[in-house]
Image (cartoon, grey):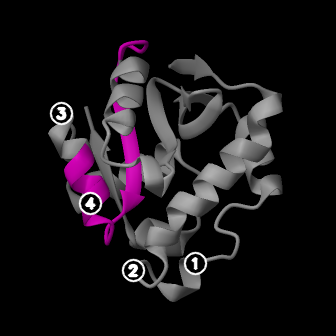
């Protein structure tokens, strides 16, 4: 079941992100890896900045999350994660389809360039990777991420 997440879900969202993000360890640049990957204070800052999370609930337990953030004339997919034990069941695709169905205008997602599995996931769902010049423009226009992360990222659009 897909539902809106609330403040009550913050601890579960944090746990899902940090558990699923372990796949990045040793893949993304080491200076971009943090433990935990997303501390609760960073998660709360994202929510305060307008990221609204939706979640997939399985028998009363949140097992996948995906955020939407409206920035200017576009909507960003933010922090899309599914607990590893639940991956491969279509949860991420269902969350993406549900959220994408709610927006009009450009839908953008940024991910690590080394996360080939994430890039393939978004490509399967109708996203296309933009050029390096367009990526730089989009990251500077719609995101607030450090320069090092910008250098190590890609942007996809639908």
Label 2, label 3: how far apart the Cα atoms are? 25 Å
The residue singled out by tag 4 in the image is 117
Q: Residues within 10 Å of mark 1 (few under 14, many from 20)?
A: some
Q: Is residue 130 above or below residue 100?
A: below
The residue singled out by tag 2 in the image is 27
Residue 130 visible in the picture: no
Q: Residues within 10 Å of mark 3 (few under 14, many from 20)?
A: few
The residue singled out by tag 1 in the image is 33
**Does residue 108 belong to the magenta stretch?**
yes
The residue singled out by tag 3 in the image is 126
Mark 2 and mark 1 lie on one chain; the one further toward the N terminus is 2
Give, as a single range, the part of the protein colored magenta. 101-121
Q: Quadrant of residue 133?
A: bottom left
| Residue 31 location (% of width, % of height) | 57, 85
Mark 4 and mark 2 lie on one chain; the one further toward the N terminus is 2
**Does residue 116 belong to the magenta stretch?**
yes
Image-based side of 59 in relation to 128, left or right:
right
């Amino acid at each position: 079941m897909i539902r809106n997440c609330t403040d009550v879900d913050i601890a579960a969202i944090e746990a899902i992100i940090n558990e699923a993000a372990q796949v990045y360890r040793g893949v993304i640049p080491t200076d971009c890896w943090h433990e935990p990957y997303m501390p609760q204070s960073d998660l709360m800052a994202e929510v305060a900045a307008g990221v609204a999370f939706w979640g997939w609930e399985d028998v009363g337990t949140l097992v996948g999350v995906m955020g939407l953030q409206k920035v200017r004339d576009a909507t960003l997919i933010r922090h899309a994660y599914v607990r590893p034990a639940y991956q491969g069941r279509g949860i991420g695709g269902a969350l993406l389809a549900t959220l994408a169905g709610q927006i009009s205008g450009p839908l953008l997602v940024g991910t690590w360039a080394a996360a080939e599995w994430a890039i393939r996931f978004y490509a399967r769902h109708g996203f296309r990777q933009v050029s390096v010049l367009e990526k730089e423009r989009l990251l500077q226009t719609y995101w607030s991420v450090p320069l090092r992360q910008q250098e190590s990222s890609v942007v996809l659009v639908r």
